[in-house]
Image (spheres, coloured by chain):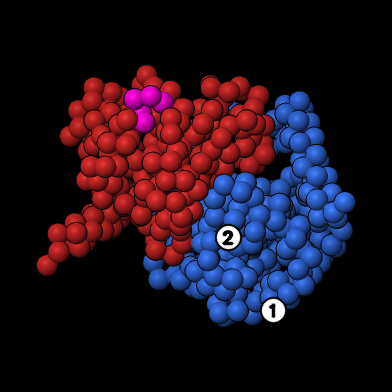
Chain colours: A blue, B red
Amino acid sequence: MKVALLLFPGVTALDAIGPYEVLARVPGWQVEFVAAEAGPVPTDTGITSITAGTSIDEFRDPDVLLVPGGQGTREAMEDAGLLKWVGEVSGTARWTTSVCTGALVLAAAGLLEGRRATTHWLYLERLREFGAEPVAERVVTDGKIVTAAGVSAGIDMALRFVGETESRGVAEAIQLGIEYDPQPPFGSGSPDGASPDTVELVTAIAALRDDWLATRREGP
Amino acid sequence: MKVALLLFPGVTALDAIGPYEVLARVPGWQVEFVAAEAGPVPTDTGITSITAGTSIDEFRDPDVLLVPGGQGTREAMEDAGLLKWVGEVSGTARWTTSVCTGALVLAAAGLLEGRRATTHWLYLERLREFGAEPVAERVVTDGKIVTAAGVSAGIDMALRFVGETESRGVAEAIQLGIEYDPQPPFGSGSPDGASPDTVELVTAIAALRDDWLATRREGP
């Protein structure tokens, strides 16, 4: 299986690195980070970069495309060249997958129309703008499109994906290899489990950030 | 809080990126990837790099040191300059933390003698060689030293750490922000939960890899 993990400036690192750590461990799979240009791609925090080994022009015909999320999806959703590439690659790939707001990039490329899909809980309703049906589940599969919820959900998606497309035995071994026996300290990992105050706080911070990002892009 | 996340060639990406994604979201905390030299540091799979913003010589007096694991810890454990730096930084830091086999680097720097600690389940007993007491728990705190189990355990450790050193409210909000509501598809994330066959397979593969790495380093 040939897997392309897309990077773009402003990507959320864990969206990409979570699935990478699972998929890169499948014997025989070829996993590559790809971006507009090969080289380090800055993440959303601005304090680190993840290196793409190959440009999207050079990495042809992956069997699997994975699009992570992050605040950089805003630019990605308006990048006609990138969306064209996503659409073309998805047309020939066996599977098209996303983590977090990577689903909005798939949506902007026209790939989620009429499909059930998920994304980060904060942006779930936005999927409707693109004709998709939002589903508040950790991982949603509709035909050849697999979408995962926010950030950390990419680990669950990747393990499930390996279990279904390679073998359950390999997926179980990888889960043990990365000692994925999660023990989250709080029950606040979903809007249903978190307190109303926590949901309100995270929603307010995201709104401020989104407004700020929109202003910065529009310019003075 | 000033946090230094150490990188070295052959680091396991998720060991570092899991905690990074939590710690970098704490308002007011300064989080930096550091390495022997600033710039991209290749991970253990050889297919990507994570960029260190600063060299270890330039990033002075962190409050928190985090040492991730990966097969590159073998070289790190024999790098006298690096171990000296780890020891010095740990001496003045408020907290010294590790993920996965990063604990073996702390041990090689002499920091775990007489302490309770954990690491990746495959290497847990090795802690005894350094006078530490192995503890098969997800996160182990002994004084100012906090160690986490394999790879994905760094996320749990970081959330718990933020809850204890900053505030529970901030930690809960970050857990919601990264939608950390894990739903692992299998129960194989720990040697207790995995089938004996899976444990045997992962142990055998690790032994082969370790032998190969040892041979490669010794040369012909």
Q: Nearer the viewer, mark 1 or mark 2?
A: 2
For residue B89, side relative to residue A43 (left or right):
left
Farthest-out residue, left: B220
Dot 1 lies on which element? helix
Left or right for B60, reference B136: right
> From what the image shows, is residue B141 above or below residue A63?
above
Marks 1 and 2, how far apart in space? Answer: 22 Å
Q: Residue most toward the front? A: B58
Instruction: Indicate the quadrant where residue B89 lies.
Output: top left
Q: Could you classify mark 1 by the number of other residues whose Cα lies within 10 Å: few (under 14), some (14-19), or many (20 or more)?
A: few
The circle on residue B201 is: none
Q: Residue B92: say if magenta.
A: yes
State whether residue B64 is above or below residue A7.
above
Q: Which secondary structure type mostly characterizes the magenta part of the structure?
A: helix
User: Which residue corresponds to mark 2?
Assistant: A41
Above or below, B216 relative to B161: below
At which x and y percent is residue A102? 69, 58
Q: Position of residue B78 (x, y in %)?
A: 22, 45
Residue at the image position 23 percent from the left and 25 percent from the top = B113
Which dot marks residue A88?
A: 1
Q: Are labels 1 and 2 assigned to the same chain?
A: yes
Please check the rendered image and state whether residue A130 is part of the magenta-colored stretch, yes or no.
Answer: no
- Considering only order in the chain, which callout, 2 or 1, is on the residue closer to the N terminus? 2
Q: Position of residue B83 (x, y in %)?
A: 27, 38
Q: Amino acid at mark 2?
A: Val
**Does any portion of residue A184 appear in the rendered image?**
no
- Amino acid type, callout 1: Glu
Placement of B41 over or under A58, stated as above or below: above
| Span shown in magenta | B89-93
